[in-house]
């Protein structure tokens, strides 16, 4: 017997959760952070500010096709979207009752800065407060939390914009930014825009998908990040996210898999509160139930990418690898090394499908002949059952850490395939990855990286577990304390063991791993439903 399909209340969900904005034609983003003052009148002004923003908030309603009139179940497609989220202290500043807030999860109450030892943000160049010897290293001023000082970031306003004809953001991004700031200024300092973002404008954090310019002068946005890898592959798919047929199709490679290769979507409650999760429980955080239902949490992390350190280290280790494995050229060694670190080649083709250079070239030719849905399946649909020892894809590669698929199946190495359990231990650790790159690769100030928004229903069980146990430790992969070679917190002397795809070449110890990715700031946020937003704005959150 199959269960009835999940019908989400899309008009009650904020946008950006079910689908990332960027691949839907919104390659530009902007984050504005606000602080609400400590008095009763400040709280009233904060709720009034929120009430004036409510008509501008983008829900998850389906959009009409460009240029078409909306059908009864659709709304017009915007050119700029707006969404709102709060820190714990922001909810408190807006007078959400403590009887509601006391049932919020501990990581959300603590905030990201206090969780630094869990996340690896207290190690080396990740540390929250800058050491004078580090020069410009450390968190952006807007995110820093002084000891014994109140948290400043209360309200986050997130904008996404379509592109204009010249390849830049649509002019409405600037207009809406001005409107939001004007609403804050109208409170006469009771709601204050926080400054201190590193980058072109300290008043807000800009983001933008990376782009290419064609010979005819047109711009094309590409789903890649600053190290050159294709991004946004294999985000989780869950029940109710799309229509039933699309959900079933996209769950292949992106949902849960049993030990026999059958895929299904994950349970809705892993990502949205108020719905059953993989444990058959309904996660609710804070009474009344309408306050948490259809809301979610996300971890926002501004992650700086040290491109100079990456390029230098890759070039040096690639020369050594070329000599050890007798590869034809340093260029081939470079691509091979990066692929072994990521678990994918730069175009997204997984090593499970193409473990070496020659097979990658063949896979590229095959993929070029595929239709878009075939390409998606080729990049996403695979397991590690056929590669238990990491000959094809190293067991400590980034993709095997971030999404272990079936690798941690208790019966992974069983001689009885019928006993295998698939991804059951991984299914409760998935996160929805949203966000965009920031900065340019050629920026002389070195301000470039990714702003990551990791959505989940349980910050501790999902986001923090993956960050601490899988990305920053290697015990589950029989690798001791070795961290992820790309995004892990690296200590002096760390290295990456590069296994060969065949049994003729010895393992290569790529030593001296620098810190490629360092945290520039962030916090934990609650993104409420449209209903809860109105409750907060009206001061009508009643836990009784």
Image (cartoon, helix red, strand yellow):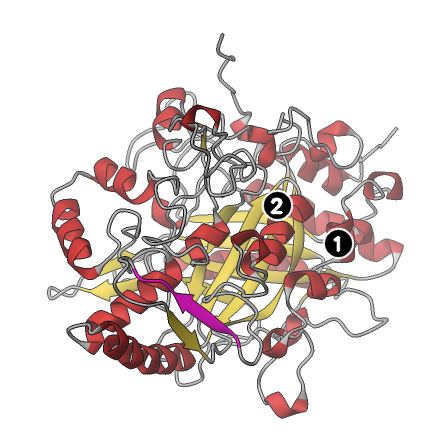
Q: Is residue 460 left or right of residue 417?
A: right
Q: Residue at image x 61%, y 55%? A: 469
Q: Which residue is mark 1?
A: 90
Span highlighted in magenta in the image: 494-500
The percent position of residue 207, horizontal first and vertical second, equals 45, 63
Q: Residue at image x 44%, y 40%? A: 19
The percent position of residue 208, horizontal first and vertical second, equals 40, 62
Asked if residue 263 can be seen in this view, the reply is: no
Q: Tell me if residue 72 comes above or below residue 389 in the rendering.
A: above
Judge the density around disc 2: few (<14), some (14-19), many (≥20) Cα neighbours within 10 Å.
Answer: many
The foreground one among 33 and 347 is 347
The percent position of residue 426, horizontal first and vertical second, equals 54, 40
Q: Tell me if residue 55 comes above or below residue 173 in the rendering.
A: above
Instruction: Give how far apart the Cα atoms at labels 1 and 2 are.
Output: 23 Å
Q: How many marks?
A: 2
The percent position of residue 474, horizontal first and vertical second, equals 56, 59
The foreground one among 30 and 470 is 470
Q: Which label sits on residue 462?
A: 2
The foreground one among 214 and 203 is 214
């Amino acid at each position: 017997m199959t269960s009835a399909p999940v019908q989400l209340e899309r008009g009650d969900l904020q946008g950006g959760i079910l689908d990332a904005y960027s691949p839907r034609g919104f390659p530009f983003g902007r984050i504005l952070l606000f602080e609400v003052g400590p008095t009763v009148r400040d709280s009233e002004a904060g709720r009034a500010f929120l009430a004036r923003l409510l008509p501008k908030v983008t829900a998850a309603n389906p959009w009409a096709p460009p240029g078409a009139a909306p059908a009864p179940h659709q709304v017009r497609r915007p050119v700029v979207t707006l969404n709102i989220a709060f820190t714990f202290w922001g909810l408190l500043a807006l007078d959400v009752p403590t009887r509601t807030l006391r049932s919020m999860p501990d990581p959300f109450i603590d905030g990201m800065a206090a969780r630094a030892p869990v996340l690896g943000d207290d190690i080396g160049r990740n540390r929250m407060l800058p050491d004078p010897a580090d020069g410009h290293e450390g968190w952006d001023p807007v995110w820093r939390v002084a000891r014994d000082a109140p948290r400043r970031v209360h309200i986050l306003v997130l904008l996404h914009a379509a592109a204009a004809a010249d390849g830049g953001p649509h002019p409405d991004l600037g207009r809406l930014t001005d409107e939001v700031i004007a609403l804050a200024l109208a409170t006469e300092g009771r709601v204050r825009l926080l400054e201190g973002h590193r980058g072109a404008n300290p008043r807000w954090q800009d983001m933008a998908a990376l782009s290419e310019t064609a010979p005819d002068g047109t711009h094309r946005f590409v789903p890649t990040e600053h190290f050159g890898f294709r991004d946004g592959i294999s985000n989780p798919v869950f029940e109710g996210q799309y229509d039933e047929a699309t959900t079933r199709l996209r769950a292949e490679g992106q949902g849960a898999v049993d030990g026999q290769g059958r895929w299904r979507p994950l349970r809705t409650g892993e990502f949205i509160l108020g719905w059953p999760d993989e444990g058959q429980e309904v996660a609710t955080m804070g009474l009344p139930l309408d306050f948490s239902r259809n809301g979610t949490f996300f971890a926002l992390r501004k992650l700086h990418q040290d491109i100079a350190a990456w390029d230098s280290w890759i070039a040096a280790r690639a020369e050594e690898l070329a000599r050890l494995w007798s590869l034809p050229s340093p260029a081939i060694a470079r691509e091979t090394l990066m692929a072994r670190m990521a678990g994918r080649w730069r175009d997204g083709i997984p090593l499970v499908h193409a473990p070496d250079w020659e097979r990658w070239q063949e896979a590229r030719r095959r993929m070029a002949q595929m239709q878009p849905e075939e390409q998606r399946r080729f990049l996403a649909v695979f397991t590690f059952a056929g590669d238990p020892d990491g000959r094809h894809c190293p067991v400590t590669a980034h993709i095997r850490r971030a999404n272990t698929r079936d690798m941690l199946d208790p019966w992974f190495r069983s001689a009885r395939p019928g006993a295998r359990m698939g991804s059951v231990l991984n299914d409760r650790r998935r996160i929805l990855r949203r966000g965009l790159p920031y900065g340019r690769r050629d920026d002389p100030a070195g301000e470039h990286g990714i702003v990551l928004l990791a959505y989940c229903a349980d910050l501790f069980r999902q986001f923090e577990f993956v960050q601490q146990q899988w990305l920053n430790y290697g015990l589950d992969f029989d690798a001791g304390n070795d961290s992820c070679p790309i995004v892990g917190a690296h200590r002096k002397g760390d290295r990456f063991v590069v296994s060969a795809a065949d049994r003729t070449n010895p393992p290569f110890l790529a030593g001296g791993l620098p810190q490629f990715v360092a945290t520039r700031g962030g916090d934990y946020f609650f993104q409420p439903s449209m209903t809860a937003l109105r409750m907060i704005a009206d001061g009508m959150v009643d836990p009784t």
